[in-house]
Amino acid sequence: MTVRRRIAVATAGFGALAVAAITLAPLVGSTSIDLRRALDWSVPFADNVDAQIFFVARLPRTLAGALVGASLATAGVVFQGLLRNPLATPFTLGVSSGAALGAMLAITFDWTLGIAGISAVPAAAFAGAACAVTIVYALARAHRRGLSTDILLLAGVTLNAFFSALILCVQYFADFADAYRTLRWLMGDLDVSSYQPIITSLPLVIVSFFVFAWLARPLNLLSLGVDSAETRGLAVTYAQRSAFFSASLATGAAVSIGGPVGFIGIIVPHLVRLIVGSDHRVVLPASALFGAAFLVGCDVLARTLIAPVEIPVGVITALIGGPFFLWLLVRRT
Amino acid sequence: MSFEVPARGFVGILGPNGSGKTTLLRLLAGTRQPSGGHVTLDGVELSRLARAALARRMAVVPQETHLAFDFTALEVVLMGRYPHLSAFEIEGPRDLAMARAALAATGTAALEDRLFATLSGGEKQRVVIAAALAQISPGSDRDAGILLLDEPTAALDLAYQLEVAALLRDLQQRTPIAIVVSTHDLNFAAGLCRTLVLLKDGLVLAAGPTDEVLTKANIRALYGVEAEIQSHGGAGHLVVVPIRRVPPEARG
């Protein structure tokens, strides 16, 4: 099968999965609604309770889940390709917690961008992610052949601990209600009830996905090694910087919506590679779509497992992702 | 130092560890800038050539290639087409045909769908050479490609060393490419290279046709080793037999 065909087949397959997840997820919940009635345009919206629940109460959360899942999964693919290590993810590298610290600061101190009161949370999350990534980048440059798994995991643990300390510090100074709210958010929570956070973060995601599309072939070359990529005509430093910047941007956008939801960036790319192979031109779109479907699915579990109580979705992904990560680690050694 | 790789030339770079073989290859490949002096391709300074333009003429085969992810042999060879495509372009039928031709030329056509990581050392090296050929093709006589190989047999056992040597000899006879190979293996170099450059401490100790450069005196000066050099009928080329290490004070 040619690459073009493989991209088309993977996009169609995983796309169908994502569309199904996004359409079906809003139907699940305390009040059961009917999709046909919700999409029945002959009834005025004001009188159509099903449509109101579908579009106002539940769809924003589902779309937020899809956006976060797609961003974290593809950011994982890019970090893995860039650092030449299949265990690199926004979460394990500490990039998510960097983003969380930035977002926490913006939430706790009510920062705005000064333009029409637009929230500064996505920008602050991006700044935090970029800060964490700069540290990992410095480590990667010290080891020209890419990061060893040991250094990678140690760096991730250290950065996570460091940012967690700062997050605790911010929480300590917050009042009680704020502290509780941010604690839930830090667990990875898709409790989104409007389209506002999605719209605020969308530009960041679009920019990063555009860069990802260009990065697909450079990431293929980088998996041969930095030197081999360069002698095949790749501007290596430029590609590496683009990858770090765009993956931080996607991570920041995702974290600003849903908090540091973990392990999406490792579960999704690995399952996708098992199915479609390693060519990043196929893996990236497939991971975006499967990541969206996967997180939306996890969120349905989070909402329904012990309903009416909601579990933060980050707890679900960690319960799946933790053992998965350990299995990968053992399998590789 | 100064030396030239002629069109269709086959140049071996010999020298002990730390003599500058790898640095010299990096300078030739343009991945490292000279602190002084010039490296030119057809009279044009390498640093003035666009990276992709240079990559279309010159390919590098490293000592070993480890992939971070599972790619098939064909995918690895298709990566050689990178400098021929624009930013969002996908390989077309012509690129696929060149990749398959390169696989066939290196005797690895049957391995096309195998995962690179599952191949033997010799097979891997032949697939990487195929990727290099796909990268520098189509090379005409006028702008023929250049293949740089950095100790291509150092990580291989004997049978695979001979396999790679036979492949390089065959390529050199059938195509107009120039080959530069750095190696520790004196007999590998003696059997393949038309000219040799002997490097010691970053300087050229001797350079010229293999038969003239490969002498007892040069081997002694290069490695501090006493060696017999014979013309071997069976192998059809000079053969170096190391005898003993010469104590430093007796090297002259």
Image: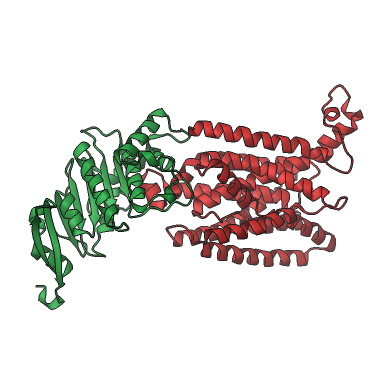
Chain colours: A red, B green
Residue furthest to the front in view is B234
Q: Residue at x 76, y 41 (%)?
A: A62
Residue furthest to the top in view is A42
- Horizontal arrangement in the rendering, residue A7 relative to residue A204 (left or right): left
Q: Residue at x 19, y 39 (%)?
A: B173
Question: Is residue A34 visible to us here?
Answer: yes
Residue A22 lies, in percent from the top left, at 74, 37
Q: Is residue B235 above or below residue A196?
A: below
Residue furthest to the right in view is A47
Frontmost residue, A291 versus B6: A291
Number of labels in the image equals 0
Residue B60 lies, in percent from the top left, at 31, 48
Residue A36 lies, in percent from the top left, at 83, 28
Q: Is residue A227 above or below residue A37?
A: below
- Horizontal arrangement in the rendering, residue B5 relative to residue B58 (left or right): left
- Horizontal arrangement in the rendering, residue A254 relative to residue B163 (left or right): right
- Horizontal arrangement in the rendering, residue A195 relative to residue B65 (left or right): right
Q: Is residue A71 above or below residue A187?
A: above
Q: Residue at x 70, y 34 (%)?
A: A19
Residue B228 lies, in percent from the top left, at 10, 64
**Which of the 4 image quadrants contains residue B98?**
top left
Question: Is residue A115 visible to us here?
Answer: no
Q: Is residue A133 above or below residue A165?
A: above
**Which of the 4 image quadrants contains residue A95?**
bottom right
